[in-house]
Image (cartoon, helix red, strand yellow):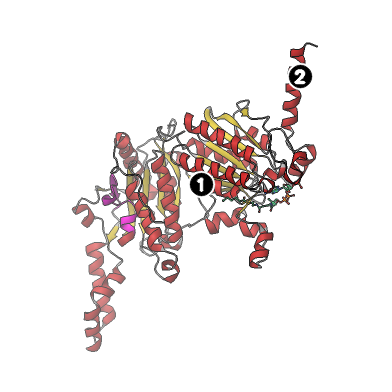
Amino acid sequence: MSKQTEKIKDLVAKRELARLGGGQKAIDKQHARGKYTARERIEMLVDKDSFEEYDMFKLHRCHNFGMEKKQYLGDGVVAGSATIDGRLVYVYAQDFTVNGGSLSETMAQKMCKIMDMAMQNGAPVIGMNDSGGARIQEGISALAGYGEIFERNILASGVVPQISMIMGPCAGGAVYSPALTDFIVMTEGTSYMFLTGPKVVKTVTGEDIDSEHLGGASVHASKSGVTSFTAKTEEDAMELIKKLLGYLPSNNTEEAPRVECNDPIDRKEDLLNDILPDDPNKAYDMYKVITAITDNNEFFEVQAKFAKNIITGFARFNGQSVGIVANQPSAYAGVLDVNASRKGARFVRFCDAFNIPIVSLVDVPGFLPGTGQEYNAVILHGAQLLYAYGEATVPKITITLRKSYGGSHIVMGCKQLRSDLNFAWPTAEIAVMGASGAVAVLCAKDAKKIKEEGGDVKAFLAEKEDEYTETFANPYQAAQFGYIDDVIEPRNTRFRICRGLAQLASKRQSLPAKKHGCMPM
Ligand code: HXC
């Protein structure tokens, strides 16, 4: 055997060893937990044979606590470039079979390398996280590694899409990096996110709680809003990410890919002419409106289980990717509150950063009153949504279906927040507040007098409410001032949005020069 052949053989053997990660026993353990290994995960996500791995031979440099015996080629992360549906992406997958995927200084270097490449080449970064956080044996070097990663997450924010997949127990720094990215997907029953695990919680606060209730997928999907999506299996999570990427551009200088559309843009949806209940206080399902107007009735929802009173997600109009923000009358009457505002603001900002037009469907009775909201800073969070809409320079189209009262009217993409096209259905009620609230304020003195004189206060108030409704509960006052561009027949909504988007395709709008604004948070 020639020396060269020998060296090639040695390379092949080294690669094989690296592919084993923490060894067969650890791989079997990972499988027994219903989880795939880092390499299997990457293979499932990317186009066949497209993965180009870097730093396969990297080793950690730690000698504390017997770490010299825990040396595995490539250390605890697999990283490189690949394509998904033919588009370039950068991917890393932490390898739980190697020291619990805990982050070493050298692992951080591998992750930072591909993040730098992603920035330079304008491609999304997808991180698969399965890690016990900073590698304890490395002390400050591991923490510094996280610092390097976080800084790149921050610099990449708004430049390339960043997506985090949580596929195991993730603690400490392993949750802060995902928190800095645009979308998180958690697998149900096998992934957890917490700053500190149940044992530390018990020690510090005395609280007895298991991993699932502390930071499982369902907790972060419905209570904290930390995760954007959950998936039943790892396979489902991969499909979800591929679908999501289809709605996104590769970077902030590009547009999202346009897909061929066979759904006629002038498709009329008669069901929309009959969807609103006669009683304005009765609910209906906004999902029916959304799917009636989008291409092929498709809607890809983001944060579906969190703050259900507002709906956010992606759809297409005439093949163009669009972000939809819609109030949901069948969840808390579609009222805006702290969580709905946070959810909406985050989504609007993402769309704006990545050139995705925003279509808003409005039916909102106002902001939720009370101490529960005030003490949790609904003022700041409501302002956050307001700020996000007002700052966004992408094409913005707002359709008011029914209620649009007071502050919530302003917040949800009104004309004065530089919305481009504002349409209203004839059923729209655009006013400072609802009839009963307004009459209670305006007619309090008269009502008191009528009561003192023994008159019929109820009849008086009802008459005044009718007068108020007649004057304000319609779109024509706003249209009279040009705050509504047109009052449209509901069944034409899809057509008007498609034509509006075509018109706005060349929109150019800028913000005053500044380092950055100070968004209320
Ligand atoms: C070094 C670690 C580790 C860590 C796990 N391991 N976490 N090694 N540093 N942070 C090792 C274990 O010693 C074990 O090694 C192997 O990984 C598998 O871990 P197990 O505990 O056996 O697995 P499991 O029972 O599934 O528990 C997983 C876990 C638990 C929930 C992640 O290991 C855990 O609680 N780890 C610590 C989590 C934590 O508190 N991290 C915070 C770090 S501080 P062997 O050799 O026995 O197989 C931090 C600060 C960053 O991250 C701050 C940024 C702002």
Closest to the observer, 447 or 230: 230
Q: Amino acid at mark 2?
A: Lys
x, y percentage for residue 215? 61, 56
Q: Amino acid at mark 1?
A: Leu
Going by the image, does 437 lie left or right of 212?
A: left
**Residue 198 in view (yes/no):** yes
Quarter of the image for residue 374 reads bottom left
Q: Is residue 420 within the magenta segment?
A: yes
> SS class of the residue under badge 1?
loop
- 414 in relation to 465, above or below: above
Q: Residue at x 26, y 51 (%)?
A: 416
Task: Check residue 36 in the rendering and tell me which mark sits there, or answer none.
Answer: none
Q: Residue at x 77, y 16 (%)?
A: 6
Closest to the observer, 464 or 520: 520
x, y percentage for residue 217? 60, 53
Q: Which residues are magenta?
A: 408-425
x, y percentage for residue 440? 28, 75
Q: Which residue is mark 1?
A: 180
- Most extreme residue toward the left, as rendered? 480
> SS class of the residue under badge 2?
helix
Indicate the quadrant containing the C terminus: top left, top right, bottom left or bottom right. Answer: bottom left
Q: Residue at x 50, y 51 (%)?
A: 303
Going by the image, does 502 lie left or right of 16?
A: left
First reached walking from the N terminus: tag 2 or tag 1: 2
Closest to the observer, 108 or 327: 108
x, y percentage for residue 233? 65, 45
Task: Check residue 9 in the rendering and tell me which mark sits there, or answer none.
Answer: 2
**Residue 298 in view (yes/no):** no
Going by the image, does 163 lie left or right of 334?
A: right
